[in-house]
């Protein structure tokens, strides 16, 4: 994997993690509609 690909992968992972945390804070559910 190239350095650029690793950087993008890290950014996407961080973004997904932040979205998950934000969703949990707003709804009180880790995955809305399931738990």
Image (cartoon, rainbow, N blue to C red):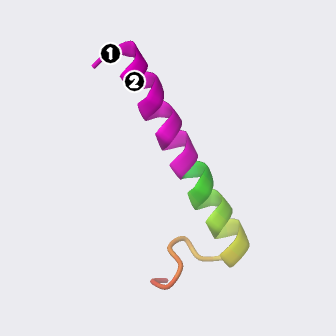
**Above or below: residue 9 compared with residue 33:** above
Considering the numbered disc 1 on the image, is that residue within a helix, a strand or a loop? loop
Q: Nearer the viewer, residue 22 or 2?
A: 2
- The CA distance from mark 2 to mark 1 is 6 Å
Residue 22: % across, % down: 67, 61
Crowding near the residue tagged with mark 1, few <14, some 14–19, many ≥20 C-alpha atoms within 10 Å: few
Instruction: Residue at the far left: name it.
Output: 1
* Quarter the N terminus occupies: top left
Left or right: 2, with 31 as reference point: left
- How far across and how far down the image is residue 33, in percent? 49, 85
The image shows residue 1, relative to residue 28, as above or below, that is: above
Relative vertical location of residue 4 with respect to residue 34 in this rendering, above or below: above
Q: Which residue corresponds to the image point at 45% horizontal and 83% vertical from the top-left?
A: 34
Residue 13 on the magenta span: yes
Q: Are the two marked residues, 2 and 1, in contact with CB atoms closer than 8 angstroms?
A: yes
Q: Name which residue lies at 37% across and 24% down.
A: 5
Q: Residues within 10 Å of mark 2 (few under 14, many from 20)?
A: few
- Say if 35 sits above or below 15 in the image: below
Give the percent coordinates (x, y) of residue 25: 71, 67
Mark seen at residue 2: 1
Q: Magenta segment, which residues?
A: 1-16
Give the residue at mark 2. 6
């Amino acid at each position: 994997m190239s350095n650029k690909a690793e950087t993008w992968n890290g950014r996407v992972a961080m973004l997904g993690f932040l979205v998950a945390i934000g969703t949990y804070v707003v709804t009180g559910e880790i995955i809305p509609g399931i738990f």
